[in-house]
Amino acid sequence: MRPILRKSFRGAARATAFHVLGVGIQSGLLLVVALPWLWFVPVSTPGVAASALYSAGVLVLSGPLLSRAQRARFRARLGVDLPAPAGLADRPGTRGIAGWLRSAAGRRQLRYHLLVGPLSWVGGLAVLGLWAVGGAAAGVYLWFWTLPLGWRVDHRGYSTLSAYTTVVGVALLCSTAWLAKGLAQLDTRAARELLGPSREEELARRVADLAESRAGVVDAADAERRRIERDLHDGAQQRLVALAVNLGIAKATLGDMPDDVRKVIDDAHGEAKEAIAELHSLVRGLHPAVLEDRGLDAALSGIAARLPIPVRVAVELSDFRPAPTLEAVAYFVVSEALTNVVKHAQATRAEVAVGRIGETLRVVVSDDGVGGADLAAVTGGTGLAGLAKRVASVDGTLSCRSPVGGPTVVTVELPCAL
């Protein structure tokens, strides 16, 4: 019996305390609503109408405060957090009772107070009454032992009756424990549907939270790239430059070296310069310093100057400067697109146009090459597919128009409000 009793009464105390608090809230509301009926008994039609109007007005006016009290009850006694619907306050003065009633969330809360609240009050009273009856029945032996000895001698059958009553009392206590927990679960389910945000509002909130967390991840990744770029530029790259300079000085000053030693120094000097060039390219690919210092126009002009074909760059942003994350995405889109033009398009020229249209940063890369680029056909995670994923990470869109024979136009639109 011990495991059964332990399982029955586990959590029953919290559920009972939850019902006690609910009975207190509903009893206080009922007392305020019934004040006219307690002070006088209205018999005339105007008196009954005025009393009913008062009761309805009290219920409506106290609706936001009741919602706040009920949320506090669920949070304090059951550990259930019921967030207020978006844009709806629990204080009447914030939006006004009229706005509260006009909103779908306000009407849902009113249904809870009109329907679920009274039923919860009745259920709470029933639970408290059953606890009292069950406790009295289970402790019947204590009651009998308080009676005089003469009475117990004259009523010898009381022990059998007490045994049956005790069993019934224990069974009633177990049943009441399950009833208290079951009613608390039903009340919680109803409160989630009526007091909290609707499923559509909850979904919208989760989408907003996910978008915010994703933006944080993107910003953190961009900041980490900038940190790595600074560390490489100020650390490893400078060491390699110093090494190359020292090797160059050794070549120039040590003229009496054997040929094999000179060859080793020449090779080391060449390897050092190649390592500097590769590291410089890597640093520029991570996050170019010119992008952070001088913005998109200078950074894109630097890309165009390094290409073997003429590239026209037009950046028209006036005094607007996009967020660092958007600048990085736009820079790498243009860099990768122009790299593809040089490698695959067989183009003789290319154009880059960057501008702001409303709340959208628009980047267009075009060339006069052979065309045939297909965004859907690229599945390796690189090229246009990689660009599309990177653009999508900031809620942007990428489209590619590339008929066979050319020209190819890659258009990227990035939301400025990142």
Image (spheres, rainbow, N blue to C red):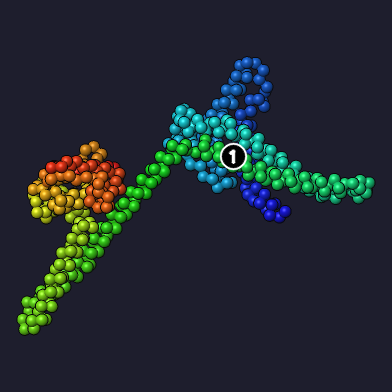
Tell whether 359 sits left or right of 185.
left
When asked about the image quadrant of residue 279, the answer is bottom left
Q: Position of residue 298 (x, y in %)?
A: 15, 51
Count the marks.
Answer: 1
- Residue shown at the point (23%, 48%) measured from the top left: 384
What is the three-letter code of the residue carrying label 1? Answer: Leu
Tell me the quarter of the image containing the C terminus. Answer: top left
Between residue 207 and residue 196, name the one nearer to us. Answer: 207
When asked about the image quadrant of residue 317, the answer is top left
Between residue 379 and residue 416, name the one nearer to us. Answer: 379
Residue at the left extreme, as displayed:
255
Q: Residues within 10 Å of mark 1 (few under 14, many from 20)?
A: few
At numbered mark 1, what does the secondary structure look like: helix, strand or loop?
helix
Q: Which residue is mark 1?
A: 186
Residue 90 vs 231, above or below: the answer is: above
- Residue shown at the point (46%, 28%) measured from the top left: 102
Residue at the top extreme, as displayed:
45
Residue 46 vs 231, above or below: the answer is: above
Residue 118 vs 42, above or below: the answer is: below
Q: Position of residue 29 (x, y in %)?
A: 60, 33
- Residue shown at the point (25%, 39%) measured from the top left: 359
- Asked whether residue 277 appears in the rendered view, the answer is yes
- Asked whether residue 316 appears in the rendered view, the answer is no
- Residue shown at the point (9%, 51%) measured from the top left: 309
Q: Position of residue 407 (x, y in %)?
A: 13, 42
Q: Position of residue 353 (x, y in %)?
A: 15, 43
